[in-house]
Image (tube, helix red, strand yellow):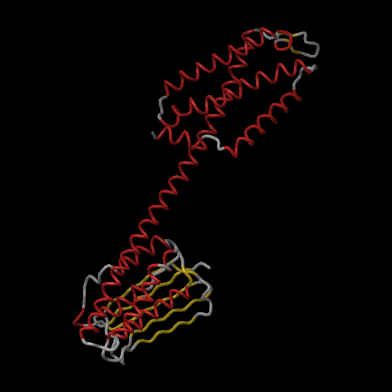
Amino acid sequence: MLTEQVYLCLMPKSRNVFVHVFTWLLLTALIFFLSDKSGWKDRTIQTVPYGAINISLFYVSYFWIADDLILTRSYGRAILKLLIILIVSTGLKCMIAFLYMDSIMRYGDHLEKTLTWGQYVTSNIIVGTFFILMSTSLRLILNTYRHEKLRETLETEKLNAELAFLKSQINPHFLFNSLNNIYSLAYQKSDKAPEAILKLSEIMRYMLHDSHDHLVSLDEEINYLKNYIDLQKLRFKEEVFLDLHIDTNNREYRIMPLLLISFLENAFKHGVATDPEHPIQINIDIKDGLLHFTAKNRISKGNKDKTRGIGLANLRRRLELGYPSSHTLYTNETEDFYFSDLSLSLDR
């Protein structure tokens, strides 16, 4: 099955047939006009039938012998096939020479010299071997190229699948936390519950529809973060203290969606949001396409979770896949504070 798939993959596509035909016609015409024969008849006899046999050798080797050498590595069978097509092609050429002895076997300025059959057979074996080697080399190059492209495609699909899986983890994780918050508001019969549901609806619209692309505008991602902050503020009875600083006039940049939410989730879930002396600090700066994101929060002693859930682990993996060589992430946890620092090169 693999051999058949590779065979079909390597067969010239219809759009390349013209290139093949044109190339062989050009080479045949070149050999025709460079022939040492004087008459058109002799040149035609020397060029056309021999060209047809050599071209046949090329494609027979390409589709019949190369599989044994490259795919199945059946070298004995490949050598046997090689001998068969060389014998057949040389026999055909000998028949042509026998029919057109004067046109084929004689050479020199006045056709005063005659090739021996040994010389003739040897020269044809060399020429045939050359076409077979050229065909096999081309097949090997194309096979290597196609397999490399296939490997890259499979690797890309694997990475995309993993990214999609990681993104899918974010949605239920976020939804679970938000529904808990809204449940708390509803249980308290808070007037903030309807507004919280509306904010959650806006956030879920972004997560379910707008974030399906590999990259989204930075402006959309920042608005998503603001909506999340507003939703979190609604669930607190006390005033929430959060300093959000966004210093960017270049929101035409694009970023992987749902990338920065883990920092905010971490700050609200494990931090203290109601301390006016130690507010949650979120800073977003962009300069020359480099995003610098920092988050700092005081750690809640009563809600200190050593595992910190899937959020930051998910974030690290997404960064590795989406920005393998264009990001740095630093986190530091002390007894009282948690600090995150992300630098990321953005696309336009």
| Front position in the image: 305 or 171 | 171
| Front position in the image: 250 or 37 | 250
Q: Is residue 39 left or right of residue 135?
A: right
Q: Quadrant of residue 214?
A: bottom left
Residue occupying the far left of the picture: 302
User: Percent x, y for residue 276?
Assistant: 31, 92
Q: Quadrant of residue 319?
A: bottom left
User: Percent x, y for residue 35?
Assistant: 74, 21
User: Percent x, y for residue 12?
Assistant: 55, 35
| Front position in the image: 22 or 124 | 22
Q: Is residue 307 left or right of residue 70?
A: left
Residue drawn where x is 35% and y is 76% of the image: 201
Residue drawn where x is 42% and y is 24% of the image: 75
User: Percent x, y for residue 8?
Assistant: 48, 35
Relative vertical location of residue 262 with respect to residue 58 in this rendering, above or below: below
Q: Is residue 113 left or right of residue 315?
A: right
Viewport quadrant of the N terminus: top left
Number of numbered discs visible in the structure rendering: 0
Q: Quadrant of residue 329?
A: bottom left
